[in-house]
Image (spheres, rainbow, N blue to C red):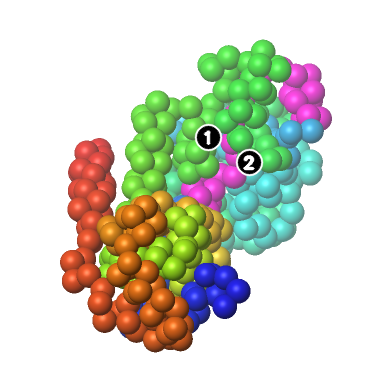
Amino acid sequence: MKSYLSLVPISAKVHKRQSRMTRICIILAVFLVTSIFSMVEMWTKAETTAMRHNHGDWHIALQNIQDNEAEQIRKDNDVAFSSWYDSINANAEQDYYIGGKNAVIYGIEEAYSTNIMNYPTEGNYPQNEKEVVLSADAKELFGVKVGDSITLNTHAGDLGYTITGFYQDDSEFNSMVNGICVYVNRDTFNHIRSLNGETSASQFYIRFQNENRLKKTIADFKLKYNLTDENVKENMAVLSMLGASSNDSINQLYPLAAICFVIILISGVFMISSCMNSTVAQRTKFFGMMRCIGASKKQIIHFVRLEALNWCKTAIPIGCILGTITCWILCAILRFLVKGEWADMPLFSVSVTGILCCRWYCYSIYRSSFPCKTGSKGLAGSRSIGKHRNIKAWRLCSKVRRFQDRNFFRYSSRNRDKEKFIPYYRLICAYDCSFSIVCRLP
């Protein structure tokens, strides 16, 4: 035996039952944390996808800006997509009709339908002042197809257009206004607006290139172009899921989520640490004998840490795999069986957050001080051996040295302390705190 650390695999073989229970405890803790954080991450991705689909894939909309300012912003490297947006008869209370149904008129650019709202399209974007795109509901409502002609009834008279395509837009909104949406280019929109004497507040939609640190990007963007809060409208649904919203009521939820995140992690560490403390406390005499034969406190600490890493090298990967598979199964059940608002749950996606948490677990277990200190103390009498050189103690040491390594572990195992120090109160306190915080959530 060249080093005390070479006793670790021998100790694992002798104490198979204790090692097995410790590994099971670590597997369960890692499994629970991986499952929880993986499901939270999958839910966040699903909700973000749903918000983009329902509210549009844009970050901010600028109001009361000039065309030259918009063109300058469009060339900014931080801007991925942008589009003008105007509307007439948005509340369906004015006299604009097609075939006796209300018509809501939108003046947009092509990027609005393809990159901002991501509408499934049939046909082409209207290129001239005689072309329009209708809601997909118009195909069944009026029995029309691409290339047919329609008539728009306005205050200033009837206007004829050719249908160039259909957008799969918001069917619920169409049902609510009892009509359809009409999409035209900006020149056609300005022509309709001038004929009917309408006023419209144009908006300039922007989607940024990079969504990392988006809150800082928006703040720098407003400072760069001298924009005020009145000029900027945020896509609250999307930004809140990305953690970039400036709304105070939403920002108050972020610290609570972070606290719950930390409490779950600490609870798992306490669960593993308590099991390790119990295992180390049962072998106090064994560590005391190691002190008797010359092992220092630092060597005992290294021994306990290496033993913990020996458990983790198999338990943590198994816990991660089981947690990931469980997350996949739950996501599939929610997506294909429950459906509804869970229809966007991703499948076979690996949670980076869950894996990083497990790596933090491994580091926390390695740096765990309480089990190491418990093991390094050993027997209470082992400290007096070096000071008083008790003759009986030295005889015991000489006998222990003649034992083989395996018999040495069995001897210490038969004479271990019957008292078990299991500090489960820390785990109970952690869960009590987490429940208190969750109960206070609005």
- Residue with the mark numbered 2: 211
Tell me the distance, in whole angstroms, between the alpha carbons under discs 2 and 1. 9 Å
Which one is nearer the viewer's eye here, 369 or 191?
A: 369
Q: Is residue 430 visible?
A: yes
Is residue 75 in the magenta section? yes
The stretch in magenta equals 48-76
Q: Residue at x 79, y 23 (%)?
A: 72
Classify 10 Å Cα crowding around label 2: few (below 14), some (14-19), many (20 and above).
few
- Residue with the mark numbered 1: 244
Which one is nearer the viewer's eye here, 4 or 71?
A: 4
Give residue 14's position: percent from left, percent from top.
39, 84
Question: As drawn, is 163 to the left or to the right of 89?
Answer: right
Give the residue type at disc 2: Glu
Is residue 12 in the magenta section? no
Q: Give the SS element for disc 1.
A: loop
Give the residue type at disc 1: Ala
Question: As drawn, is 45 to the left or to the right of 67?
Answer: left
